[in-house]
Amino acid sequence: MSIATPTQNPQSYLAAQERWRPVEIVFWLAALLPFVLFPDYLTLASQIAITGLFALSLDLILGYAGIVSLGHAAFFGIGAYTAGVLTKYGWGEPITGLLISAAVAALAGYLSSLVIARFRHLALIMITLGLGLLLHEIANSAHWLTGGSDGLQGMQVWPLLGMFKFDLYGYTAYTYSLIVLLIVFVMARRLIHSPFGLALRGIRENWTRMPAIGANRQAHIRKIYTIAAAMAGVAGALLAQTVGTVSLEAISFGRSADVLVMLVLGGAGRLYGGIVGAMIFMIARDQFSGIAPQYWYFWIGLLLIAVVMLLPNGVLGGLSALINRWRSRS
Amino acid sequence: MRGSHILSAGAALLLATATAQAADTIKIGLIMPYSGIFADTSTQMDGGVKLYLQQHGDTVAGKKIEIIRRDAGGVAPDVAKRLAQELVVRDKVDILAGFVLTPNAMAASDVSAQASKPLVIMNAATSIITTKSPYSVRVSMTLPQVVTPLGEWAAKQGIKNVFTMVSDYGPGIDAEQAFQKAFKAANGEVLGSVRMPVNNPDFSPYVQKAKDSNAQSVFVFIPAGTQPAAIMKAFVDRGMTPDKVKILASGELTDDSALKNLDNSAVGVITAYHYDHSHKSALNETFVKDYRAANKGENPNLLAVGGYDGMHLIYEVIKKTGGKVDGASFIAAAKGMSWESPRGTIAIDPETRDIIQTMYIRRLESVNGKLQNVEFDKAERVKDPVKAAMSK
């Protein structure tokens, strides 16, 4: 995350960032462990992968471009409802469903980016919050289409690739979610380590200077906002397809807030921050609520306060600070 | 750099180890919103479950009953479905039960159908839920089951026309449609209707509309809690007191949580419901007394009765089948079963697996200085009208 030193030329800086590190390969191999070690937890694992993907999409706009959003669930919800409505009305093929949902969410993202790109900080919080609430209310009143507060019913998701049914143990769900997460992650990684990604970080760091050095700030923000919306839509569609229903909760303020918390927990502005945050949050939630169904929120709250106080840059930020200190000492 | 989270994940996952299932134990997985804004509903429902276990012991037909509780935390079908899956594959539960909220019950029904596990719905009240799994059974109610008899009753009393006011969400719309249908079928006239926002509504403009319609009666459906006091105040402010206009509602309007905020101006409101703690029967008296003793003097409501009756159904089925609780045996035994509940005699419809029960028509009265729903009429053996219409 360090900004390039003046002596290094940009091409070699980006190329060095682009290289896959051994620990990343270990990370993705470890993602296969649940199949062997915790086959009873595959459904949870698949929902973690989906939430991680959603958090990654928020990271692109919040962590890299500095666009604060309290309404990112709008795109998650649009993706989920698109996938849901498609399967309900006869097109149950998951992969094309995913692509169509991404396209619809991207369109919504593009349209709202026309407004988003003009504002910053507090105004952005208000606008994204307002857009999120607006869409939530639309989904509630479009009862005939979304099922309103009863949730969308009658989804028939076809087997994946025509072969793999979504089973009770969650083998298909986890395999499917993990592969989609990996593909989207690789794309996001490539994007972040491109000159475009570097420009985004420039916009985050100095909003007024970027146009001065020739970067079209608004166009960049529109682009990344649209991409992030499409990714959030994919995550929503994945959830809809693996769960087989969509509720208003998919598009609620609560989901926007949760994903923000997860991202901050893991570390914003780091590719793995969202995924790690989703892992910690959801595993902690699963374990705490298993022990005390009434009072688990207390422990989650305590965990969040502890992380934010002790590790202001999230778990990954704390880890990399530790490693840097250890390296400079040896 | 970023490897250590794998260890933390592994450690956390190891915390929960699958337990081997003993053959003489029957496990029940309860899924309810124990945390969040719906936590009160779970307190009531779980209170009913606990009371039943306390009164009847945790062993039935030689089988020990073990309860595993899971928190769905509000409207979250994805969480509810995952919890149901995990309860089935990891905790090896035999029966899924609970369910306050419709979307959660629907999502868990998929698991019930896929894994052939019985699913006992103790509250969620949308008609179609029971059609999602052939192994589900409901012991609570459906909203049309409550308001259809009310519509018929109102027309029979000579009420010629009505103005309906409902909250603009699933249950409100269901209530509006069922009431209007029943009232119109009995030659009543609907002069107008409004749908009001679910969250923090200002009722005055809607009440004004109702007044302008000059309807003889008003039908109201809003969520229990603080809203009933607000809408009653709006009625009183505009002179629409129950002695001038008949105010008809489903029991949520005069639920215990609402009565705390209502005053004598609400006396005369007419509601239909399947349970109130003031219902007169020997069984209900013990039920209310024991429930209060176990819950700091709190009165049981429909959710507590749902939990209680759900457990009763499970116990009776286990007795009847001698402990066979696979989906098919459970449902075969549950179909047509009839028993005395604190709310009166109830039965499971053999065709729809939904509940058949008595709907009481009550008038809100001041009894010894306290507001109380006094039953004065009833409709017996009411089935869910929506599914009855489907099968025709």
Image (tube, coloured by chain):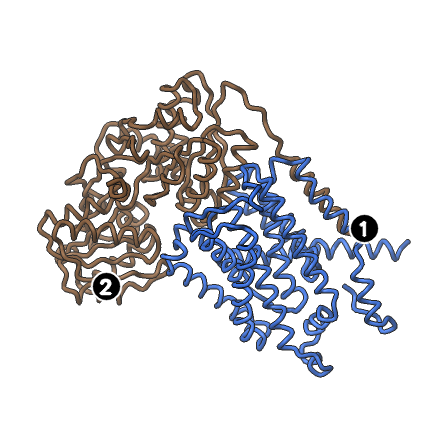
State how many labels appear.
2
Residue A86: where, in percent of width, then height?
Answer: 47, 55
The amino acid type, in three-letter code, at marker 2 is Val
The answer to which image quadrant residue A63 occupies is bottom right
The residue labelled by disc 1 is A22
Q: Nearer the viewer, residue B131 or B38?
A: B131
The amino acid type, in three-letter code, at marker 1 is Pro
Chain for colour blue:
A
Q: Nearer the viewer, residue B45 or B287?
A: B45
- Direction top: furthest residue: B62
Element under disc 2: helix
At a point 59% along the width and 27% down the height, the residue shown is B19
Horizontal side, residue A24 vs residue B207: left or right = right
The answer to which image quadrant residue B134 occupies is top left
The residue labelled by disc 2 is B207
At a point 38% along the width and 39% down the height, the residue shown is B44
Alpha carbons under labels 1 and 2: distance apart: 68 Å
Q: Would you say residue B54 is visible in this rendering?
A: no
At a point 63% along the width and 65% down the height, the residue shown is A62
Task: Please rate how many residues cluster around mark 1, counting C-alpha atoms within 10 Å: few if below 14, some from 14 to 19, many from 20.
Answer: few
Residue A143: where, in percent of width, then height?
Answer: 37, 57
- Direction bottom: furthest residue: A212
Residue B140: where, in percent of width, then height?
Answer: 32, 38
Q: Chain of mark 1?
A: A
Confirm whether circles 1 and 2 share one chain: no
Residue A213: where, in percent of width, then height?
Answer: 73, 82
Q: Nearer the viewer, residue B14 or B58?
A: B14
Q: Nearer the viewer, residue B72 or A51?
A: A51
Mark 1 or mark 2, whichever is nearer to me: 1
